[in-house]
Amino acid sequence: MAWRCCTRRYIGYIRQRRGDSSVLSVRFGGDQQHGESTIRHPDVSVSVVNDVSTPYNNTKKGWRGSVKEWLGSVFLPVGYPEAVGSPRYLSYVGWQALHHACSSANGALASAFLLYSAGLGSATALPVAGAFNWILKDGLGQGATLMVTRLVSRDFDSSTRLWYVLAALQLDVAVGMEIMTWSLPPWLFVPVAASANCLKGLAWMTGGSTRTAFHVSFARMGNIGDITAKATSQTICASLVGTWGGLAIAAGIHQDVVLAGMACACLSGVHIFSSYKSAMYAPLRTLDAFRLKRIAESVVRGEKEMPRPDDVKDVLFVPPGDEQCPQYKVSIEHIARHHRLYMEEYGDLFAEKKYLVIPRRNQRPLVLLHETCQIHDFVEAGICVVHLGEKKDRINQDVFDEEVIRNSTRAEKDLVAEEVRDSIAIAHHKTSGQATVARMERLGWDTSTVMETYMASAAEWG
């Protein structure tokens, strides 16, 4: 075929498998009649498709078609829906839009009351003093943000959804503090406003960092830049709507701090709820303790299909009493102090392993990783924890308590040791070297970054 189709606008591509050959279907938009042409190669065949059904084509459909095309080009990634690889994307975008609209409305309302409190809205106050207060609260707030950031940023990758919702909560608390400055004595303006600004800085840093992980989860064709750019367009549009709404509310209530507080509370409730909903719609592909637990459960139970990232119904946080969801961030000093008898009786069972599992009654089990631990060892530890948890009909988690170990007979301890040894062997067999990890990667799981997250507390033994 003539390569004139290459002058038409590129929309996206889908890689498929047909028999023993790969087929690369390339979609173009244009005015010409849709159809399909195939370029064949000994190893690869490329199928070029003119698809006038895409929302980006230039076919004349009247003003409604033109508007739809323009909106798609501004707010949706090129090649949607194939380019995002998940049916959750539009739901995610919708909740994100509501999230940013409420945030901007609250911000506009709080800014109005901050101006009143700083003295910039008063006819008797000195403008220079008001401006000085404003600059001072910004400087103190930003400095405090830098100091706190280093303490919390490490947990963003392992608890992405939770931190995103906490960022929304931090922002709403900061907005409430800014509105309160209008009813406080003038000398409290700088410390309260600076504290609020610190919270806002943390919220923006936390929200932006965790939101990047959401964008990566939708980028299935190496198009993270395009998805981020379109997310910026979506945010700007929603924020403009929210800002005008916030200004309208501020103009309607004037300087009534009670009405402002009620409006802020309503907007904050919707803001936090929409942040939760949008976070849950992002199909995160990175591994954390809960997602590894779901994978390990499918392996232990012999299920034919291992769950994909879209299949896992994630949670905002892991319940503290989940006996099959490991807690990886634990120090060897903590284990030596609180689990000394367990280590004396059962520690040698893990001598040749790159992990150490400590089950606990009504608590999440502890997993200590060796400093040379690899991804397959990490997965094997998760399978071992789940397999031990499935043995409740034979052993109870009480047998691992320090007091129970102290009062147990040698025969009882040997029985427990045999069950632990069996779980270790089953986990090793189920993992089969790198086979399980390779299978996870084929299903879309990202195993490249998990070790950086959990190796901070790794130890050395043996």
Image: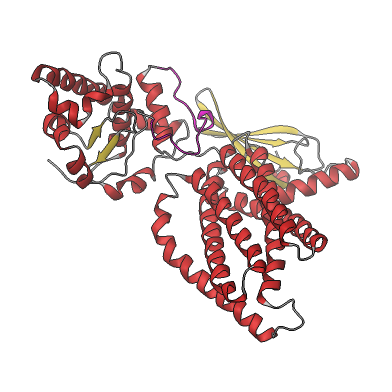
The residue located at (69%, 42%) in the rendering is 94
- Decide if residue 393 is on the left or right side of residue 276: left
Q: Quadrant of residue 254?
A: bottom right
Question: Over which residues does the magenta segment extend?
Answer: 303-321
Q: Can residue 222 be seen in the rendering of this structure? A: no
Q: In which quarter of the image is residue 451?
A: top left
Extreme residue in the right direction: 62
Residue 319 shown in magenta: yes
Is residue 256 or residue 177 the one in the foreground?
A: 256
Q: Position of residue 117 (x, y in %)?
A: 67, 72
The main secondary structure of the magenta stretch is loop
Q: Position of residue 396 (x, y in %)?
A: 27, 20
Q: Where is residue 442 in the image (x, y as percent from the top left)?
A: 44, 31
- Decide if residue 461 is on the left or right side of residue 205: left
The residue located at (45%, 36%) in the rendering is 445
Height in image: 97 above or below 306?
below
The residue located at (45%, 67%) in the rendering is 146
